[in-house]
Amino acid sequence: RIKIDSATKDLASLGYIDRKNIHQLPCRSHDETIRYRNNCTFQMIIIDGKRDGLLGYAMRSEQIAIPLNGDYFPIATRRIQQVMKLTAKNLNATTTDDKRVFRFPLLRTHLSSVSFVSSWNDTMDCIVTLNYCLPIYVDNDNKAELLSQAEILCTECQITSLILRSKKKMEVVGRAPPYINDTLYLNRSSDDDKIHVQMERQENDTLLVPVYYRKPQDAFQHPNGNTMIQALQWMLNKLQTIRASDYSNDQTMNLLEMYCGAGAH
């Protein structure tokens, strides 16, 4: 609710929009919310109040950490939800020999936040970044043990690339350099002659045109796959309309799309 009020205030401050004309519209289907975010960051907090207690996800609101009250973010992609659950479970897992000793003590120490970035497609990539408030290692022996724990966590949590980051230090395990792969499919409908963009391809869809994306981890990416696809679909159909007009029949049409990042239509 706080974010909705903040967005409403920002829009009204532009001067062109009357606050009474700004409305909140409900999502029309569960699919609209399940893929709402493919890029999200959470603060890590001790959820049981003990110094060596269990870690949990939190989001900040008015400079206050609000616990997520769960091990996943309901409006994230399913790929992020899956990795969030596995990451929280493993970071809080203890050894079989001593239930008071955590399996990944170095990965837990000074962990301040965790970021998740996934493909738009739920079956593809997910990159996780563990952010630390103090240096991630102090010497080579400490670094070797840290990376050993990171490699195990990366495998068990089904993470494509796991990044450990602190001030002036960064280590990557898994696929390096880290990037996100994605594929969209273009389909021209025979019913209305419009171009439709979709994330998935059925076995009998032989006329679909695949579009491949490779997005570096540190490049700007559209955080909402649904909105990105709608924008791309709108743009392609506008181009088709322009090309079919009398004005452009005898001219070569060139498209200059100006945006920053990768996959940010």
Image (cartoon, rainbow, N blue to C red):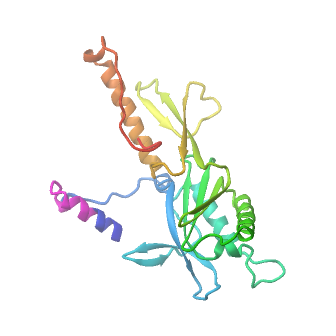
| Quadrant location of the N terminus in the rendered image | bottom left
| Residue positioned 62% across, 47% down in the render | 124
**Residue 192 occupies which quadrant of the picture?**
top left
Where residue 14 appears, as percent x and y from the top left, is: 19, 57
Instruction: Give the number of marks.
Output: 0
Region rendered in magenta: 8-20
Q: Is residue 66 left or right of residue 12?
A: right
Front residue of 30/76: it is 76
Q: Main secondary structure of the magenta part?
A: helix
Q: Residue at x 84, y 81 (%)?
A: 97
- x, y percentage for residue 180? 58, 46
Q: Is residue 170 above or below residue 68?
A: above
Q: Quadrant of residue 238?
A: top left
Indicate whether 229 appears above or below 73: above
User: What is the quadrant of the C terminus in the image?
Assistant: top left
- Does 107 sit above or below residue 236? below
Q: Is residue 75 visible?
A: no
The residue positioned farthest toward the front in the image shown: 139
- Examine the structure image and report whether residue 148 is included in the region drawn in magenta: no
Residue 17 falls within the magenta-colored stretch = yes
Whether residue 92 is visible to the viewer of this picture, yes or no, is: yes
Q: Nearer the viewer, residue 174 or 143?
A: 143
Q: Nearer the viewer, residue 7 or 207?
A: 7
Describe residue 151's horizontal placement relative to residue 33 as left or right. right
Residue 82 lies in what quarter of the image? bottom right
Q: Residue furthest right?
A: 97
Q: Is residue 182 left or right of residue 242?
A: right
**Foreground of the two, 138 or 68:** 138
**Which x, y percent locates residue 129?**
58, 61
Task: Please report the residue visible at 75 percent of the width from the left and 69 percent of the height from the top.
Answer: 141
Q: Position of residue 109 (x, y in %)?
A: 63, 76
